Amino acid sequence: MKEINNTQYFKVQKENEMAVKDIIGSVFTAMTEKGYNPVNQIIGYIMSGDPTYITNHKGARSLIMKVERDEILEELLTDYINHNLV
């Protein structure tokens, strides 16, 4: 019989979270496969917040909506600076 005075612990397993870099890569691939210009489409999404700029192909729209637009900008700018200015 369990001790009534002890506290039970319950732990919820988190989904495997993808890094922003990986999400951008997956979205880029899906957009390219569907024949879209991924740079233009991703910029449209970042500027407007309208997820319809991103294809549903391979779940790209759902993926990109898992991160905030400012996180996407931060990742892109950080990568640009690290590869071009440092």
Image: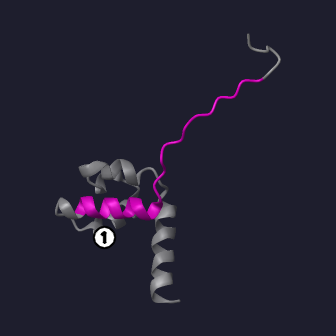
On screen, 28 above or below 65?
Answer: below
Report the residue at 18% width, 59% height from top: 34
Residue 80 location, quadrant? bottom left
**Amino acid under disc 1:** Val
Task: Farthest residue to the bottom: give it.
Answer: 85
Q: Which residues are magenta?
A: 7-31
Seen from the viewer's position, the closer of residues 12 and 61 is 12
- Measuring from the top left, give residue 1's x and y in whole percent: 73, 10
- Measuring from the top left, give residue 56's x and y in whole percent: 26, 49
Q: Which residue is mark 1?
A: 39
**Is residue 3 left or right of 73 when viewed as pictured?**
right
On screen, 55 above or below 41?
Answer: above
**Is residue 43 left or right of 76 when viewed as pictured?**
left
Report the residue at 33% width, 51% height from top: 61
Q: Is residue 12 magenta-colored? A: yes
Count of numbered badges drawn on the protein: 1
Report the residue at 41% width, 61% height from top: 22
Callout 1 crowding tier (Cα within 10 Å): few <14, some 14–19, many ≥20: few
